[in-house]
Image (cartoon, helix red, strand yellow):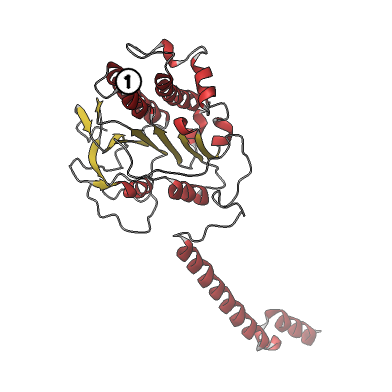
Amino acid sequence: LSSFIIKYNCVCGDTLSVLQAPGFVSFQRGDWPVSGEKIPDIVALTMGFSVPEDLSWPGLLAGPLFQRPRANVLVVVRGVDDLDLPQSVASYPLENPVPFTLDSVAETVHSLFAEDTPVVLQLAPSEERLYMLGKANAVFEDLPVTLQQIRARLSQDGSVLSSLPLNSLSRNAEADLLFLSEVQVLHDITALLQRHRHLAKDHSPDLYSLELSGLEELSRLYGKDSPQYRDAKAILASVLQKFAEDIYGLYGNSAVVEVVTVKTFEAPLTRRSRSILESKQISNPGSPYNLAYKYNFQYAVIFNIVLWLMIALALAVIVVSYNLWNMDPGYDSIIYRMTNQKIRMD
């Protein structure tokens, strides 16, 4: 990140902030607004994938063709007006904060790198919503998912309660425990990745999407001027910064970490969840009939490659067959020619 100027940054309002990015992913500093529905496209472009529609946004420049980050981590923080992030590559105001998912990016990763089984993890602890694919099923099988599991994890050795300055936060209040549970999940993800460092060295890119709503519950219960909310904001800012640094280091300085802060989404988001122990992979998780996806933007490319290759092979077979049919063995074949000469000599 030597090419970027690191400065103290206060993320105010609905914002997209880039905490970490390799040098070949060129985020430009500026106040260019970005629509919430375009965030999946931005994530796809940072990972080197194409998108159905061109993104006319000057905040991200085109990168090298043969370089892509090994991972992309998107963290959505709900219920926050401002978040003090000590270091960031760039930040942009967020317009039209509608709910979004990275399902399209996850589908692309799975379709292009199905044999390499990349890690795809989408998690929202407060809603107990989980979607995992590839190697994530094995690596994160011990990750606490439900609120009951996470709270049990808080009482075990090595939990964040022993290292965080709780100040006004309580270990017995429901909303406080929800916030601390989300912090615990961030800690456990980096701990599991440190145990499975081989995941960061393979050729398939990994995708993480996390949604945190603990601050939203604290602001609803105590108010945004309460000491609990202010202490939680300070804790989350420092935890996110360390989380981004750990992920960036684990992936060999080749990971993009973004944080989206929103006061509230304009519409509720509903989606199906999947069990962490589910091992059966279906082509379309959203369909109960195991139907294929209706359309993939790479269909046209694959169709043209297969079509013209079949045409070329068919033409080659026709030309070879025509020449073999009209061949004169006595003149065109060296085998018959040598045989005839040997008969004559005898």
Task: Report x, y in % for residue 121.
Answer: 48, 37
Please state which of residues 65 and 110 is positioned toward the viewer in this rendering. Answer: 110
Question: Residue at point 28% right, 24% down?
Answer: 223
Quadrant where the N terminus is found in the figure: top left
Residue found at the far right of this picture: 346
- Callout 1: helix, strand or loop? helix
Residue 8: quadrant of the picture: top left
Which amino acid type is marked by label 1? Ala
Q: Decide if residue 296 is in sight here.
A: yes
Q: Quadrant of residue 239?
A: top left
Q: Which residue is mark 1?
A: 232
Quarter of the figure with the C terminus: bottom right
Q: Is residue 301 above or below residue 92?
A: below
Q: Position of residue 20 (x, y in %)?
A: 31, 33
Is residue 38 positioned above or below 179 on the image? below
Q: Residues within 10 Å of mark 1 (few under 14, many from 20)?
A: many
Q: Residue placed at 37% from the left, 27% from the top?
A: 217
Nearer the observer, 282 or 220: 220
